[in-house]
Image (cartoon, coloured by chain):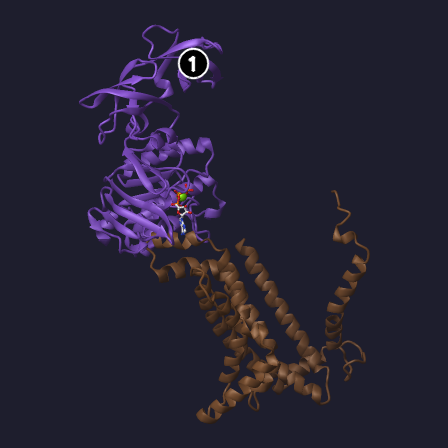
Amino acid sequence: MTESRTTAAHGGAIGLHGIKKWFGNFQAVDNVTLDIRPNEFFTLLGPSGCGKTTLLRMIAGFEMPTEGQVLLDGSDISGLLPNQRPVNTVFQNYALFPHLTVAENIGFGLKMLGRPKAEITSVVNDMLKLVHLDGRGHNPVTQLSGGQQQRVALARALAPRPKVLLLDEPLSALDLKLRKSMQIELKRLQLETGITFVFVTHDQEEALTMSDRIAVMSAGTVRQVGSPWDIYDRPAERFVADFIGETNFLSADVVSVADNRARVRLSSGAEISASFPADVTPNGSVTVVVRPEHARAGAPTGTSALRGVVHDIVYLGTDTHVHVRLDDGTAFMVRQQNARSGHCGFSKGDTVGIDFSDDVAQILRD
Amino acid sequence: MFRSRFDIKSQPGFGFITLFTFFALYLPIGALVVYSFNDAESLSQWGGFSGRWFVAAWQNSAVQDAAIRSLIIALWAASLATVAALMAALATTRTAPYRGQTLKYAMINQPLMVPEIVTAVALLIVFSRIKVWTGYSGLGYLVLAHTAFCIPFAYLPIRARLESMDLTLERAAADLYASRWQTFRHVTLPLLRPAVIAGFMLAFVISLDDVVITEFVKSGGQDTLPTYMLGQLRRETTPEINAIATVFLALSTVLVVIFFFINRKKQ
Ligand SMILES: Nc1ncnc2c1ncn2[C@@H]1O[C@H](COP(=O)(O)OP(=O)(O)OP(=O)(O)O)[C@@H](O)[C@H]1O
Ligand SMILES: [Mg+2]
């Protein structure tokens, strides 16, 4: 085990099977089952308090599940202490050892594993290069900027070559610009090292840009697992659609279902085609979502899917949001890219028709 | 700068009270230091400047004996008390709160609350029985007694430091393959060092200074410096004890200054 811990050429697979976690009589995690694949950039996304950190701490070994199993490459590690798991963590507050230098911090894991000095020195130097801190090895960590401390924390967790790296909102303390560049950096490190990353964030944009797959969590449960595209374009339920980006909810009636698409009738009477989650067969009245950028507003025509009156126009620089009150009273938003400078073509009070292409609507699970 | 009308410094009498307090605190000490350089035989009559009482004290074999005994006891007692206090502090801060925790604090700090004279008499009774049973009458009893009343002084700074320490550092060490012992050795202890040194020094000074318990527990010929000085007072007193007290003062000042600089360097 010690051998494979540091010579692993690629990342490990994490299996969470039927995990439940109670703190006293409060249930923080409710029956979570997830399979995280080797070499994957996997993100746990959800609002504050939904149990992301708790889940991560159970993978690291700081917290024991009340029920369920944690598997690493198929074998149960639930009973192992944190120092026995080939899994490292990048803590939200970095948790760098203030009494040690940058190099000593990075080499800490290897030193505890009893690696020879020469090996530690060479790995530490590689790590310093990897995170662009060459020559800073002898600095005390307390003298580094936030971004530099962040990179030391990363290097320290990567140095022992764990099978899985756990990152708990590692970017939340950085300013926007640094954050963007660290996002790219993290993605690069994940590809270069081949280590499985389990990343926690409550920032949906961060999750969408970095992840191979995302698990959206709410109140201790996993609501949906999928690629960023799945999560954004094919949300399975209202919570997911609402939490990720902005969206329009429309009520509709199912007319027919064929293969993996359904025909639904909107309140306007128009019929459109919509996709639906694989595990449901839609019937009766349903809710359909359409992303604002997938809709177009224009002069109303006989074939418009929806009709309504513009009641607000919000200019955002790159985009303009056109807020429409539909004939049945529902609010609907259209996002237009500002391809040209100047007026968007509508004014408040205009009657508009709204159209969208056939493959953008998604039926939600109830 | 705007200075509030309610600033304590502008209250009437502030200057006077301050001056009075400083005089009350430092005048006797100043007098002591000055009179330790008094050439006269008398404690309180000035007879010109001289360092002869320091020399006399230094050459007095009874003083030498008592000083060495005091240092030995203080070193042992402070060391043992610091180790015990460190373990007690770890045990009382590294667990989830539980019923009876306050009682445990109270028990550790008991020597601060029970009048010293009570402890002294109690120890006298117990130790005299043990002396009869075992026949041992060495310095061990004094070391043990001093250790006991030094523990709270070593415990308080260590516990304060532990309580303000970031627990994720220990978690990070465990995450990086450190066993519990390695975590303590490489992370917890180095971060606690200033508090451990502070605790040790406090315990050392407290032990060095003790009269009441020592007076009750010591066997014949086991005078420490303070009990020796007390004994001298009962006979004809010489300014020698002024000189010894001044050396004491210098020693504790040096300890405080050293401690200050150790802490400063950490920042
Ligand atoms: N040790 C604990 N004792 C009691 N309750 C806890 C404990 N740890 C977490 N909780 C509770 O469990 C719930 C989930 O906490 P967790 O830290 O996992 O949330 P999170 O999704 O990481 O949130 P955030 O985005 O704010 O970090 C919270 O309601 C929290 O109060
Ligand atoms: Mg959290």
Q: Whereabouts is ligand 2, in terms of quadrant?
A: top left
Q: Which chain is purple?
A: A
> Which residue is depicted at the point 19% across and 47% down?
A74
Where does residue A235 sit, x and y in percent of width and height?
Answer: 31, 28
Where does residue B142 sit, x and y in percent of width and height?
Answer: 53, 82
* Residue occupying the far front of the picture: A284
Q: Is residue A110 above or below residue A127?
A: below
The residue that label 1 is drawn on is: A338
Where does residue A100 sit, x and y in percent of width and height?
Answer: 43, 52
Q: Which chain is brown?
A: B
* Residue B223 sits in quarter: bottom right
* Residue A13 sits in quarter: top left
**Residue type at numbered disc 1:** Asn
Q: Residues within 10 Å of mark 1 (few under 14, many from 20)?
A: some
Q: Secondary structure at mark 1?
A: loop
* Residue occupying the far left of the picture: A259
Q: Is residue B179 visible?
A: yes
Query: What is the chain letter for disc 1?
Result: A
User: Which quarter shows the N terminus of chain B?
Assistant: top right
> Which residue is depicted at the point 63% across and 84% down?
B227
- Nearer to me, B5 or A90: B5
Q: Is residue B200 visible?
A: no
Q: Is residue A303 above or below residue A110?
A: above
- Nearer to me, A135 or A343: A343
Q: Is residue A280 above or below residue B51?
A: above
Mark 1 Cβ inside 8 Å of ligand 1: no
A69 displayed left or right of A298:
left
- Nearer to me, B139 or A61: A61
Where does residue A351 sit, x and y in percent of width and height?
Answer: 43, 9
